[in-house]
Amino acid sequence: MNAAQRVLELCDLDALLELARDPEAQARLQRSGFTLEGLPLLERERAKLGTAIDRRWASQYERSLGRYGRGVTLVRERVCQGCFVTLPTSAAPPPGEAELHLCESCGRLLYWS
Amino acid sequence: MAIAEAPSITTAPLDIVELRHKRRDSALAQLIAAAERLGAAREPEVLLAALQHSERLGCCALGRGIAVPHARSLTVRRPVLVLGRSERGIDWGAADGQPVHLVVAVLTPGAASAEAHVERLAVVAHALRLQRTRQRLMEADAPAAAALLAGSPA
């Protein structure tokens, strides 16, 4: 996986941990037959993954997570889905390449594909 | 369960895949490929990692030959269900030791709320409790499978 993919993996893992730590979600999932006994294991994996990411992106990720509750925000049609500011054309990644950026307006870490 | 309570299930596209593999991770990769073909997912490696993390949180094989792997991921463009069927069964590590014959992958975009994702999982798991539904899913086409998983009679 490249740097952008690792950051996405971390973001997805944080989304799963958010769900697994929520008492209401836990109760609903358990009623549906799902088990959640692997939470401590996932928390250790999260710590490991956090250190495997390039330091620059890791620090931007943690900053976005702390400030906005999500580590990564999507770009849709050149618009940051966090602050809804249109990004400059020059910021677009080459076709077919997914990239990480920082939103110049709000500072969120952006995933642009 | 009423259709109105689960709009994301009834409106989400559904694809059906005949699973060729006996191993769980190979089956997951096949389900992801189907979601990619529908244009509902990208970055298959990242999505596979998300599904594997869900498995580590708790085995997604619910017993009685069914598994509901799931992910709420930034790699998912729109809600989608992928139904996988395996005649010979997949070793999924279910608590009841039974091989899995029916797999319903529940894929939700990362921007959706955790509550919405849990709701989708609950609707699918509820529908799969009925033996008659499981039997019909083994032969249903996509529209009928979508209706069965939404809890409506096909």
Image (spheres, rainbow, N blue to C red):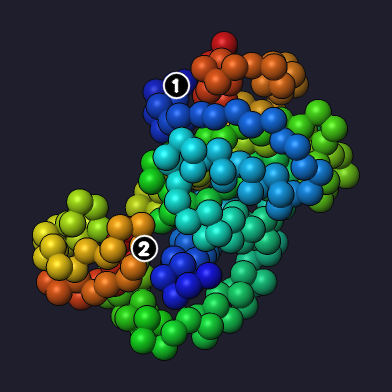
- Whether residue B94 is visible, yes or no, is no
Element type at marker 1? helix
**Chain ID for label 2?**
A
Which residue is labeled 2 in the image?
A98
Residue B3: mark: 1
Look at the picture and state if A101 lies above or below B24: below
Q: Residue at horizontal 36%, vertical 57%?
A: A96
The picture places residue A67, in percent across and down from the top left corner, at 27, 75
Look at the picture and state if B82 lies above or below B4: below
The kind of residue tagged 1 is: Ile
Q: Residue at horizontal 61%, vertical 75%?
A: A45
**Chain ID for label 1?**
B
Q: Residue at horizontal 57%, vertical 45%?
A: B32
Q: Quadrant of residue A32?
A: top right
Look at the picture and state if A78 lies above or below A59: above
The extreme bottom residue here reads A55
The picture places residue B101, in percent across and down from the top left corner, at 77, 33
Look at the picture and state if A75 lies above or below B19: below
- Nearest the viewer among A113 and A50 is A113
Nearer the observer: mark 2 or 1; the answer is 2
- Whether residue B90 is visible, yes or no, is yes
The quarter in which the C terminus of chain A is drawn is: bottom left
